[in-house]
Amino acid sequence: MKPKLSEDLKLPAGFAPLAEDPSLAITVMEALADIEQRLAEAVKQNNVLADVSSRHLLQAGGKRVRPLLTVLSALAVGELTDGVKDAAVVLELTHLATLYHDDVMDSAQMRRGAEAAHQIWGNSVAILTGDLIFARAARLMSTLGAEPVAIQAETFERLVMGQLLETTGKEDGQGALEHYLEVISGKTSSLIAACGRVGALLGGGTQEQIQHLSAYGEKVGTAFQLADDVIDVTSEHDVSGKTPGTDLREGVRTLPVLLLEKQAATDTHAAALLARIDADLSSHAALEAVVTELAAHPVAEESWEYARRWAAEGKSELASLPDTTAKKALMTFADAVVDRDF
């Protein structure tokens, strides 16, 4: 007889197929609870300031998407082991560390509903806290073998390079869209790909399965960021969690604007809207006006379709995997990253 899910055991949104298999769902939820405890232990520091600053963003919450994807990747091809859970901790810590650095570079005021670390302790402490968390992640990964360590190092390199490319801009002769996707690949997709790759590796998957789950993470990670960028100009504040048009105000060229730029070469209406986007958007009224206009423009739906294609390509990577509930959950998540149903 299958166990029943208790009323207080809530499934992660976006992974609905888990409800079809209560036994697996309980295994996943218990693993996530264990991973949460391991995360808390992993960031502990003897120094009071280092301890408080290291706990700051962890305690602010988060969806723990990366640990969940690591766990599901293992279950899709093999079994859930202690090593898989430790790897899930490492990948979440790596993500967490980048947030400290990103917030300094972006001069962010808030993160996960809490004051950004650099606003409390200053830039130096925030950067060093991120470094400490990276170090803890590396130390834990070193217990899992040479290949997981190599994967983490490669992922770390791609994360840094993605941030560098975003900071320095595109190279001579490089297309704006090509550069944009290269930045996404480094800053977002690399870590999601690592979840699939390490989860499958430590779960006992074959080399072919490991490659497919890595590619799944790469493509779904790209879909995730593309959708995030479209949401910035199409959703209300309570949906996106930030002021609509933030990227526009900061002069960041994301997919809708890049597609608008292509149209502006031959379309006077697109060119006029682009000019308004490039004008002074410091006032709320000016920003709201261009956000409304861009959200209604055909490039918004074109951008959604672009994100959906990446998600579909991610799902296609799972075709050869065994037909398990874990695989179904990964398939559903690929769609959910675009629909933001999680």
Image (spheres, helix red, strand yellow):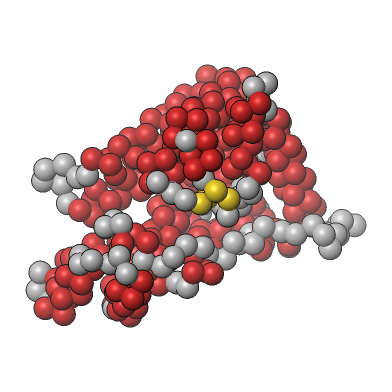
Indicate left or right for 1 with 257 as reference: right
Which quadrant does the N terminus fall into? bottom right
Visible residue check, residue 255: yes
Could you say which is closer to the camera, residue 147 or residue 96?
96
Q: Does 48 appear above or below 60? A: above
Residue at screen point 44% across, 35% down:
123
Could you say which is closer to the camera, residue 36 or residue 302?
36
When asked about the image quadrant of residue 157, the answer is top left
x%, y% of residue 273? 20, 75
Residue at screen point 74% across, 49% down:
29
Which quadrant does the C terminus fall into? bottom right
When asked about the image quadrant of residue 50, the answer is top right
Q: Does 297 appear above or below 218? A: below
Residue at screen point 37% across, 41% down:
105
x%, y% of residue 160? 37, 34
x%, y% of residue 71? 64, 43
Indicate left or right for 228 with 306 as reference: right
Residue at screen point 52% across, 69% down:
239
Could you say which is closer to the camera, residue 128 or residue 63?
128
Residue situated furthest right in the rendering: 1
Visible residue check, residue 213: no
Looking at the rendered structure, the number of numbered marks drawn on it comes to: 0
Indicate left or right for 62 with 233 as reference: right
